[in-house]
Image: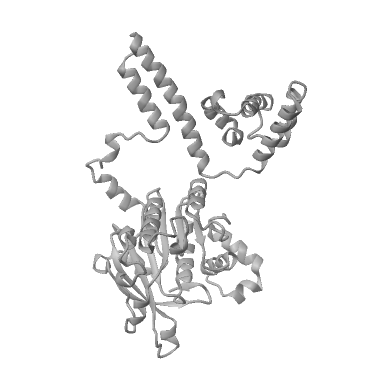
Amino acid sequence: MYLCAESPENFKRYRHYVKDHVVQPETVLILDKMGDYYTSYPSSTSVDWEAFSSFLLATYAIRLSPDKISTLRGTIVKMQTFTPTIAYEQVIKTLIEMDSLALISEECLKARDGTSDLEAISELTTKALKDVERFIDKKDLFVVPDISGVVDRILSTGYQWRLMPLNRSLGLVRSGDFIIIAARVEVGKTTFLASEVSFIAPQLPKDRPVVWVNNEEKSDSVFFRVVQATLGKTTKEIMADHTTAMKDYITQMGGDKNRILITDGHTNNVKTLDALFKDVKPGMIIFDVLDKVDGFKNDEREDIRLGKLYKWARDWARQDCVVIAASQLSGEAEMHKDPPYIGMDSLRGSKTDKPGEADAIITLGKYKEPANDDEAMTRTINVPKNKLPGGGADQLESERHGRYLVRIDPLRARYE
């Protein structure tokens, strides 16, 4: 019922799948009157439940008993407060499946009587499987033996990094890439993400924003750092004229203040995020930190949970999206000598499927015992895994697994 109320188009698409004998009589009354509502008010883009309630009861107030009227009112109240989840898609698939089975059954009876045949039954079955997204065409399982598409993608697509060492090592980052950024606490993972994401975001297609899944700091503080990184300004400079700073930020983001969307911390669950990503269709997803996302059984071994979590993130990268996940390093990272170029074996959960899902892994390190202020602001970058195709004017194959010394500027939320 919720889907049908979302738009006249949804009503036309889904109503005929809802058979009267599989739902409550009150649901049938509401759905039937919903069709009349859309016809009577053709400018309506969705059902206004208060207006619809009056429209409905004006017809049925005399015909129905007080109990029926009360039930109708209760159903409408539920619809007004209903919060959709990804489960309703499965409900629709179930209704489609029930209707399809009825059609196939009728066709089988016709075939037995000689008025139909197996080919007609096969066509109905194939259509039904497609409708519920369970049909697999063998042609979809194999790569077309032609490299031109890959070559074109490497030559014509991709986004530059702010840090030149990353452009030299990884080359351009592209939709479909899944990259892990790993560091110990207080090294500067969030600052690194703010610095790079603020540079990449304006390069994304205009209708494909960044979704930053935040579970580390206060969301407004993270956004402030993104603004700092975008403008290269200190807190003091922004506070001196925050109105102009915000205008400059929007200009840098191509006029779109929602170019980078940061979650408020209440969406840290796989199912909730699935629904969010389907709705927003991001061009880039940032997980800060992916290990803290819920949704898989907590009673499972941690290695199993992490393996499933990183596979889930990998699957979202396949949805024509860049996925960058901040991750924790284990205590082994503290054992490296200065300057610490940290390998994959120090990744928290390195013996799980976690590192295998990534196309590239970037580790960040800092001096344990800096000798001066310059070393205190120095960070190491190591690229122990890099399966990216590269490309871009600055990429060098000799630096595919590069090691670099860079500087962090925490006052401006930048790596340089």
The color scheme shown is one colour
Tell me the quarter of the picture where residue 141 sits.
top left
Pick out the residue farthest to the top. Answer: 114
Residue 238 appears in the rendering: yes
Vertical arrangement, residue 60 with respect to residue 87, above or below: above
As drawn, 158 above or below 147:
below
x and y percentages locating residue 106 in the rendered image: 41, 17
The N terminus, quarter of image: top right
Quarter containing the C terminus: bottom left
In the rendered view, tell whether residue 394 sits above or below residue 92.
below
Q: Position of residue 297 (x, y in %)?
A: 43, 56
Count the numbered circles shown: 0
Q: Residue furthest left?
A: 145
Kindly identify the residue that appears in the image at 56 percent across and 75 percent down.
234
| Closer to the camera in the image, 109 or 243 | 109
Q: Percent x, y for residue 193?
A: 46, 66
Lateral position of residue 401 relative to residue 197, left or right: left
43 left or right of 365 in image: right
